Image: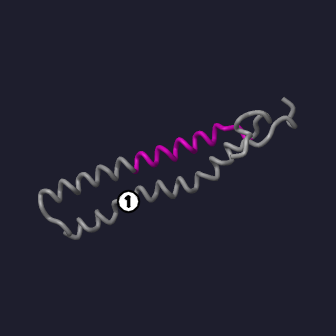
Amino acid sequence: MPEDDQVPNRYRERLGRALPRAHRQAELVGRAFARVDRAMAAGAWDSPLAQTFYDGCVEAQHSATVSAGGCVDDMELRHRREPALVPRDDRSARPS
């Protein structure tokens, strides 16, 4: 296809612009339970129920961190696989 029939891939551009925010959000998810962790380590609540609560928080933090990282990985992979240029009539060429 002649190069003048190719236009920038707007979808790829939007993904690229969204990636920094996705990285920041994933980082925040990883720290979401930090206050709970510090409070529990300082002895804020000491009982068998507290340990059950804390164990649940640790599990939730791990799951959230893994999920957030997976989302960012998926976005990065999609961004890398998208061509920089697409045919003029391609849906990826449309502005948002």
Q: Residue at x 23, y 53 (%)?
A: 55
The quarter in which the N terminus is drawn is top right
Whether residue 52 sits left or right of residue 33 in the image: it is left
Percent coordinates x, y for residue 7 in the rendering: 80, 40
Whether residue 36 sits left or right of residue 20 in the image: it is left
Q: Residue at x 34, y 63 (%)?
A: 34
Q: Amino acid at mark 1?
A: Ala
Question: From what the image shows, is residue 85 above or below residue 59?
Answer: above
Question: From what the image shows, is residue 47 above or below residue 63?
Answer: below
Percent coordinates x, y for residue 50 in the rendering: 17, 59
Query: Which contiguous range is marked in magenta?
Result: 65-84
Count how many numbered circles sit on residues in the image. 1
Is 74 within the magenta?
A: yes
Q: Residue at x 34, y 53 (%)?
A: 61
Task: Count residues near mark 1 (Cα–Cα under 10 Å), then give few for <14, some for 14-19, many for 20+.
Answer: some
Q: Which residue is mark 1?
A: 32
In this picture the colour scheme is one colour
Is 41 within the magenta?
A: no
Percent coordinates x, y for residue 66 in the rendering: 40, 46
Percent coordinates x, y for residue 16 in the rendering: 64, 49
Image quadrant assignment for residue 53:
bottom left
Question: SS class of the residue under badge 1?
Answer: loop
Question: From what the image shows, is residue 16 above or below residue 33?
Answer: above
Question: From what the image shows, is residue 36 above or below residue 94?
Answer: below
Q: For the view shown, which residue lies furthest in the top direction?
A: 1
